[in-house]
Image (spheres, rainbow, N blue to C red):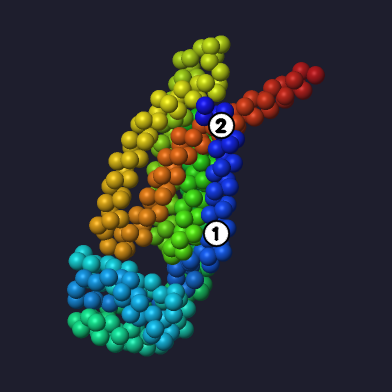
Amino acid sequence: MIVKNFKYSCLLIIISVIAAIIVGIICGGLNLGIDFTGGSIITYKMGTTFDSEEVRDLIAGVDGVGSSVSVVTSGDKGDQAIVRLQNTGGESADTEIADNILTVIKEKFSDAELGTISSVGGVASGDMIRNAISSVLIAGVLMLLYIWIRFDLASGLGAFLALAHDVIVMVALMCVFQIQIDSTFIAACLTIVGYSINATVITYDRIRENSVKLNPREYTKAQIVDYSVKQTMGRNINTSVTTLIMVAALYIFGVNSIQVFTLPLIVGIIAGTFSSILIAPALWMLFSDRIAKGKKHRSKKAIR
């Protein structure tokens, strides 16, 4: 039963996520991109398709570049390279480094040209961090209020914690595998928050329907929850599988700039499916019982 095994499932989830974050911290912590640390974005027109890892290895030895450089493929034909550098030291330094990188790239790609150079300052990156955290929190709180109004407080709290689980799992993945976190990752988190809540709403709606249809003398609350989860599980899994196929295709066949968005989505969809089927219903059961006990206790005190 879902509710019966909830304690053990939650314990396993918490241990797994904490272990993943600890491993990630040992490996170097969050790999923040220049959106959050400040730096420069330099675009090159390569003149042909290329391997981003090859270009990264090619320019890593240029003075001022360092090991934190990232290179992603862009453009309709995959012939543009976006180079991201952290803390280069100002516009003059950016121009010099960009020219040095172009010289090295031309040794391999003779038709390469320098495109645009843009910088993100320390103040702007600080604002970006605050805005990123605020956007995820605001989205979560708005979802809580929406579910609370549509269903009840227990549903809102359960949905909020389930969404928090999905985002934490995505962050843990980025931490463990040292994948760079930038504004694209925040967009992926917000996408998953919206996606996951839909699956949770389907489950909660079925729980509400069955709570009215099924005789409470014959079915306990835990049995109603389990029955509702079984009824909606197939639909939620099928929806997630079809979505995963589409996103996985984008990851496999897309350019790097698409891949950095779709990889967190894949993890988020899997985590969201798990949380909407197992975590959210069990949390609703937990909060529903707590709220009912609280009301009962207050009514007894009022009678006295």
The residue sitting at 35% across, 31% down in the picture is 235
How would you rate the neighbour count of disc 1 (Cα within 10 Å): few for under 14, some for 14-19, many for 20 or more?
some
Q: Is residue 103 visible?
A: yes
Residue 249 in the image, given as x and y percentages of width and height: 27, 51
The residue sitting at 60% across, 32% down in the picture is 287
Q: Are the residues flagged by discs 1 and 2 in contact, CB closer than 8 Å?
A: no
The residue sitting at 24% across, 82% down in the picture is 108
Residue in the foreground of this view, choosing between 275 and 304 = 275
Residue type marked 2? Asn
Q: Provide the residue designation for mark 1.
A: 23
Figure check: 176 above or below 198: below
Q: Residue furthest right?
A: 304
Q: Find numbered disc 1 in the image and state the secondary structure of the residue it sits on.
A: helix
How would you rate the neighbour count of disc 2 (Cα within 10 Å): few for under 14, some for 14-19, many for 20 or more?
few
Q: Find numbered disc 2 in the image and state the secondary structure of the residue it sits on.
A: loop
Residue 40 disc label: none
Residue 5 disc label: 2
Instruction: Using residue 26 as the reference point, say whether residue 192 is left or right of it.
Output: left
Residue in the foreground of this view, choosing between 275 and 160 = 275
Figure check: 34 above or below 253: below
The residue sitting at 33% across, 71% down in the picture is 53
Q: In which quarter of the view is residue 233 placed?
A: top left
Q: In which quarter of the view is residue 180 placed?
A: bottom left
Looking at marks 1 and 2 on the same chain, the residue that comes earlier in the sequence is marked by 2
Instruction: Using residue 299 as the reference point, say whether residue 164 is left or right of it.
Output: left
Residue 32 in the image, given as x and y percentages of width and height: 48, 66
Q: Is residue 117 visible?
A: no
> What is the C-alpha distance between the residues marked 1 and 2?
27 Å
Residue type marked 1? Val
Residue 282 in the image, given as x and y percentages of width and height: 54, 32
